[in-house]
Image: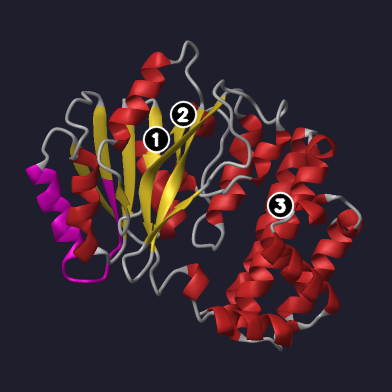
């Protein structure tokens, strides 16, 4: 069975489209359940819409109402309440591509050994309705693999929603999403990548991710971007406890360049190029991974990221701000 876990918080206006996308094109999937976790919604409609959708799709849909625990806490409750062997996380303001569940179920049926992760690509949908395919996987091949064999997969997008997860990866290893933090996905997904013995990648775009003005990328709460450092301390501490940090050090370093030194810095400087966080991100990367300037990874970056990397190194924050203002 595949359990689709949908956290809900004041997203009533999107819920009908979200839930119907799980149904459309997937009518042939017999073992399917939808779990709506109303995470203490404060509007007047989200909780009621959850209940009405469960009445409409009785037998496969159930609603859970709880006090607010944040996205991570809502996902954890969904895991606890799920009956399926596999989990798919769907944000309540996003949708699945028609037939996505059917495609994933077909993959599970065809594999001799059931993969613990099935990773697919996304459609990024802008406010203007324009759609662009987003590659989720830093490494792809037809046969299942592990990151011990192909550690380059660690650089894949860490989004929880772009994958089908075997539930036992969470329950057998005591893994859960952190509650009420930013960057809960990378804190969790990287750990699961290292634990999975069998990762299957496919090229299909099965998930529609809608760019919203209230996402982390667009948030005006600049200070909370510092939580990316907390996220990496969490990841590094956990991998050190497993005794595998030396095995993955280079790849964690590359992740740190991607997510701390480049991505978080860009988010902050687009809002405030004088923020002290810019120096803090640079210092953190340098202290944790003194070798970060020397590894060949810089040459492997796409041209645009390489330019940003060099400008961050030179601390030419004004020029990066100018470049992004021109590209808007």
Q: Secondary structure at mark 2?
A: strand
Magenta stretch in the rendered image: 36-56
Q: Quadrant of residue 33?
A: top left
For label 2, count other residues whose C-alpha is less than 10 Å away and answer few (under 14), some (14-19) or many (20+). Answer: many
Q: Are marks 1 and 2 in contact (CB under 8 Å)?
A: yes
Q: Is residue 132 visible?
A: yes
Q: Secondary structure at mark 3?
A: helix
**Magenta-drawn stretch contains 37:** yes
Quickly name the residue at label 1.
Answer: 87
Quickly name the residue at label 2.
Answer: 166
**Residue 104 x, y percent position in the rendering:** 36, 29
For label 3, count other residues whose C-alpha is less than 10 Å away and answer few (under 14), some (14-19) or many (20+). Answer: many
Tell whether 64 sits left or right of 234: left
Residue at left offset 88%, top offset 62%: 287
Q: Are marks 3 and 1 in contact (CB under 8 Å)?
A: no
**Residue 17 x, y percent position in the rendering:** 20, 54
Q: Nearer the viewer, residue 135 or 15?
A: 135
For label 1, count other residues whose C-alpha is less than 10 Å away and answer few (under 14), some (14-19) or many (20+). Answer: many
Q: Label 3, label 2: how many angstroms apart (C-alpha)? A: 24 Å
Residue at left offset 51%, top offset 34%: 170
Position of 35 relative to 12 (above/below)? above
Q: Which corner quadrant holds the N terminus?
A: top left
Residue at left offset 20%, top offset 65%: 13
Q: Label 3, label 1: how many angstroms apart (C-alpha)? A: 25 Å
**Magenta-drawn stretch contains 12:** no
Quickly name the residue at label 3.
Answer: 255
Q: Nearer the viewer, residue 309 or 256?
A: 309
**Residue 37 x, y percent position in the rendering:** 30, 50
**Precedes in sequence: disc 3 or disc 1:** 1
């Amino acid at each position: 069975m595949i359990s689709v876990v949908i956290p809900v918080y004041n997203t009533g206006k999107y819920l009908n489209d979200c839930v119907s996308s799980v149904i459309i094109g997937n009518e042939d999937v017999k073992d399917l359940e939808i779990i709506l976790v109303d995470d203490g919604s404060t509007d007047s409609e989200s909780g009621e819409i959850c209940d009405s959708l469960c009445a409409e799709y009785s037998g496969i849909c159930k609603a859970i109402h709880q006090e607010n625990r944040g996205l991570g806490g809502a996902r954890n409750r969904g895991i606890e309440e799920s009956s399926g062997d596999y989990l798919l996380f769907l944000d309540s303001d996003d949708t699945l591509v028609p037939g996505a569940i059917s495609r994933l179920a077909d993959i599970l049926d065809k594999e001799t050994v059931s993969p613990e992760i099935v990773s697919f690509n996304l459609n990024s949908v802008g406010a203007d309705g324009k759609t662009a395919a987003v590659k989720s996987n830093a490494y792809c091949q037809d046969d299942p693999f592990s990151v011990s064999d192909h550690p380059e997969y660690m650089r894949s997008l860490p989004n929880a929603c772009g994958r089908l997860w075997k539930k036992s990866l969470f329950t057998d290893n005591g893994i859960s999403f952190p509650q009420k933090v930013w960057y809960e996905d990378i804190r969790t997904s990287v750990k699961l990548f290292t634990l999975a013995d069998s990762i299957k990648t496919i090229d299909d775009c099965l998930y529609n991710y809608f760019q919203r003005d209230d996402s982390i990328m667009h948030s005006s709460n600049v200070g909370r971007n510092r939580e990316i450092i907390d996220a990496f301390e969490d990841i590094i501490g956990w991998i050190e406890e497993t005794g595998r940090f030396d095995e993955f050090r280079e790849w964690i370093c590359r992740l740190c360049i991607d997510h701390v030194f480049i991505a978080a810095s860009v988010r902050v400087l687009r809002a405030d190029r004088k923020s002290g966080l810019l120096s803090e991100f640079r210092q953190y990367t340098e202290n944790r991974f003194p070798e970060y300037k020397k590894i060949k990874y810089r040459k492997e970056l796409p041209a645009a990221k390489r330019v940003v990397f060099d400008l961050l190194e030179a601390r030419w924050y004004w020029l990066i701000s100018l470049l992004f203002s021109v590209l808007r």
